[in-house]
Image (spheres, grey):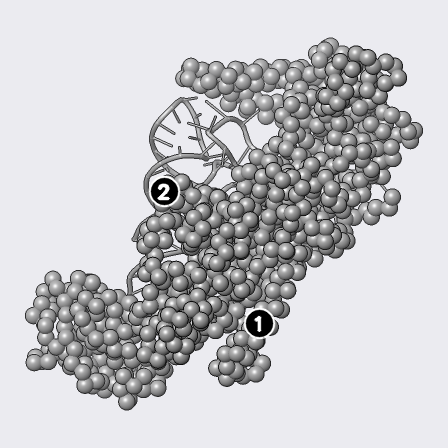
Amino acid sequence: MEIPKAYEPKTAEEKHYQRWEQAGCFAPEINENPNAPKYSIVIPPPNVTGSLHMGHALQHTLMDALARRKRMQGFRTLWLTGTDHAGISTQLQVTKRLWADERKTRWDLGRAEFMDRMWAWKEQYQDEIKNQIRREGASVDWSRERFTLDESLSRAVREVFVTLYEEGNIYRGKRIVNWCPRDKTVLSDLEVKEDKKAGKLVYLQYPVIGTDKKLTVATTRPETMLGDTAVAVNPNDERYRDLIGKTIALPLTDREIPIVADDYVDPEFGTGAVKITPAHDPNDYELGLRHNLPQLNVMNDDATMNGAAGADFVGLDRYAAREKVVARFEELGLLEKQEDYEIALPQCERCGTTLEPLLSEQWFVRMNDLRDLALNLMRAEKSPRFVPEVPYEKTYTTWLENLKDWTISRQLWWGHQIPAWYDSEGNVFVARSAEEAAEKAGTSDLRQDEDVLDTWFSSGLWAFSTFGWNGEITDTEDLRTYVPTDVLVTGRDIIFLWVSRMVMLTQKFVGKKPFEDVVVTGTVVDKHGKKMSKTIGNVVNPLDLFDKFGVDATRMYLASVATGADIRLNETIIETYRNFANKIWNAARFCLLNSDGARVDYYFLNPQAEVAEIKKLIGDELIDDLDEEDEEYLDKIEPEFAKDNPKENLSIADKWIISRLNRTAMDVNRALDRYFFHEAVSRLYQFFWNDFCDWYIELVKDEITAEEPNVWRDAARSRIITVLEQALRLLHPFMPFITEELWQMLPETNSNLHNPAYANAEKTIMLADFPLGDADLIDERAESEMQAVIELISKVRNIRAEMNIKPSERVTLLVAANADSHRVFSENEAQILKLARANDLRLTDKLEAPKASARAALSGGAELAIPLEGLIDFAKEIERVEKELAKLNAEAQKLNAQLSNENFVSRAPQEKVEEIRARVADIEQRTKSLNQTLEALR
RNA sequence: GCUCAGUUAGCUCAGUUGGUAGAGCACACGCUUCACACGCGUGGGGUCACUGGUUCGAGUCCAGUACUGAGCACCA
């Protein structure tokens, strides 16, 4: 077999995904077990705005690891995929391109043609996204792919809208909204970003009618004074008490406005008098309602001034109008002063334009009922369960408690058009279709609302609309089977925008939770901790990392960071995992190059299971009738035969690696159950590199590479390749490509390695049974015995390195130990000699070594000496031993202090005290031995 | 202003029932040991931000302080 010396990720990555997809491995239908438990995840649909970023790669890695493990365990596993039309973001992209390429706006094109451009864009990026998801190795079910503008999903949107409207939970009304003058649409509060900017606080004097007084107001937005309909002061403010009820001659206009009293006004701020512009400020709007003030809108939707602003100002941009207002006040002698003032300005999250609070007619969702659904679920059932629990559960609850109505109309074209129709008199008819609306109106002379719905309105239905629910159809096999899904993996930035709304809407329309758990991932930031952004130019494209380090290595890296923590992208660490992939490759290469006569057979790792299996198969009574000719069976069930059976005769090293493997499998499963991806990754890394490569391969190397074929060698070969095979399965959820590539190279096996649920499927590691780990195969004794061997070898190596003994120089090892250790060391003599580069191991009860020896104390009271006649540097050796003694001393001191503390001895658990005592005893013994060594050296 | 998170080896980070502080990288020394130099072996390196408390015992629990970051609210 020709196997390249270095792992080439591309080779494996290009080969397997397509095969998996074509074999139907990603669809739950691959599962042949009608009683299989289900496992489902719905992808947070990427926006068709552009290509995928590191955040997607992170989330997809975690979802894939979860899905792959459950699938391997025989769960009927569905990971549903799809994309989101992402209203404003996508429209903005297309608008930008249209302007850049053709200097045209959407209105130049008209709605129909602009929509054609939108769909073309969507096709292009949807394809790109799909290819990227494939590249990531994500095991999503393409047969159930969805897009938020699909017919069925759109129907669901209309159904939900109509229902909420009929209940009175959706209404149309005039409110102050966040208006983007560039995109010319309203935005919800959650789509607003705030940014602190340098501004001016301008003090304007308003003459009070019937007096010679002037009332000074402070404002950051002088231009809105053209829309003032009152000035407000605090009712308890002594300075202004006598002015309440009087009127003001509003400069630059011919209007007279009242002075009103309202608690909203903070007497401490500015002058304590506030100009009130109900049509251009949310607080003023509220105040205006309380005092029945007119709402005078002085702006157009592009933030230029309209006719109501007066002839002098009409057509001016808001900033030009601001300057002009200030200039005019100055001319009139009414400008008191201007101060520098830092102001937080609301900005459009998508395009960055400063928003204008604008009074406008929009559609809203009343949140009271929906909010209660979500709050009750959290209070009564603690659902959804957030991971990490703190602080998201708290943030989520607090947010729900303070929830305001949700503005859902958007003045865009890309999205679900609002299912409301108007007749010529402006009466509104909300219906599922134009036909239904016509029926309700009694006329077909209707005009549909031009606006579309907030993207998050349709995303809010994603948890069930993707399973076929569309209002007309409300019960599907998929809905029954897969909802609630098991887990949602998403970023913390959309807990409110998306997670909460899915909870509310799914609960309301399907009567179920959308998902059990929510794993909140951190943000992938650059190596300086800065958010990745196109403007800073620090965006890292996952595809580049895939090219550079391989998909598997990148996935391991992404999974290796603690769940929920931000990921400061560190290519050096990805390189570590690239090296790890190469290590796996070469360990497998070694096993495969020595695999003649080997077969993958789990019973090599658990012979007792085979015995039990055979007994079950032939029945206890028949066993007694077996004779010499049934040797094959006898070997397995009769102890005296088994002794000679290489399959059952396990060395300490074998038992050790089997124990380590099972321990690892249990740890990995437990970690994944708790969404501790990083723990699973680190356990796998340690097991594979430290246990399997550093020790097991080295310990059995001679046996495996023996030239002469024989049953013992072949058993050893089978054993190591079976351990490897199990390890590949454990690694598969994180490293799908390399594990499949290697798994396909494994020698023939006499049993089906698939989970029984996939007995007839095409052979692939992704359907192999995922090892759960067997507690019965954890062998504490073998682990501690092996630990002693490892300690001995390490000590010798340490001495060799510190004494500068050449690798070619063979040494003699003198070891004094008790009977048990004698057995362990002599059983592993060959390995010890090889790995410690020694030519002789002499085991005795008492250490008798020449003066010119290097010595070390081992745990369990064993002692080691290496005669170094002519090689030893006494001064150096003394130094080395003294260093060791100092270390032991420090530890002993700490422990003895504890033991001499009466409170500790009496109050700490007995076993803890015993443990400390045992450690002190061990240290004392070592110290004694090392002191003797020093004596001998001097 | 409120809330939350982080502060552990030179760097990036692990460390969940409180009980001997870990990894990778970097660094130093030595290795063409027949799977791997994307490698092997060995080693040095930490008053776990600070102050106080609870406890026999605190990186871990509690309170506060400092710095860093995030979210929310307010902003005439």
Q: In this view, does A281 lie to the left or right of A301?
A: left
Would residue A493 be found to the left or right of residue A176 on screen?
A: right
**Could you tell me which chain the residue with mark 1 belongs to?**
A
Measured from the top left, where is residue A713 in percent x and y?
Answer: 85, 27
Q: Is residue A570 left or right of residue A355?
A: right
Please give the name of the residue rendered at 71% of the width and 35% of the height, measured from the top-left corner: A726
Residue displayed at 86% across by 13% down: A627
Kindly identify the amino acid type of the residue bearing the numbered disc 1: Trp
Answer whether residue A184 is visible to the viewer in this image.
no
Q: Which mark is residue A119?
A: 1
Give the amino acid type for the residue marked by disc 2 in the picture. Arg
Q: Residue furthest bottom?
A: A311
* Vertical arrangement, residue A637 with respect to residue A246, above or below: above
Q: How crowded is mark 1: few (under 14 residues within 10 Å), some or many (20 or more)?
A: some
Comparing A812 with A116, the one in front is A116
Residue A782: mark: none
Depth order, front residue of A771/B67: A771
Q: Is residue A242 visible?
A: yes
Q: Quadrant of residue A119?
A: bottom right
Question: Is disc 1 placed on a helix, strand or loop?
Answer: helix
Q: Camera-side residue: A460 or A897?
A: A460
Tell me the number on the disc at residue A379.
2
Relative to A67, does residue A881 appear above or below in the rendering? above
- Quarter of the N terminus of chain A within the rendering: top right
Distance between the alpha carbons at the discs numbered 2 and 1: 43 Å
The residue lying at 74 percent from left, 15 percent from top is A620
Whole-percent x, y for residue A386 in the image: 46, 44
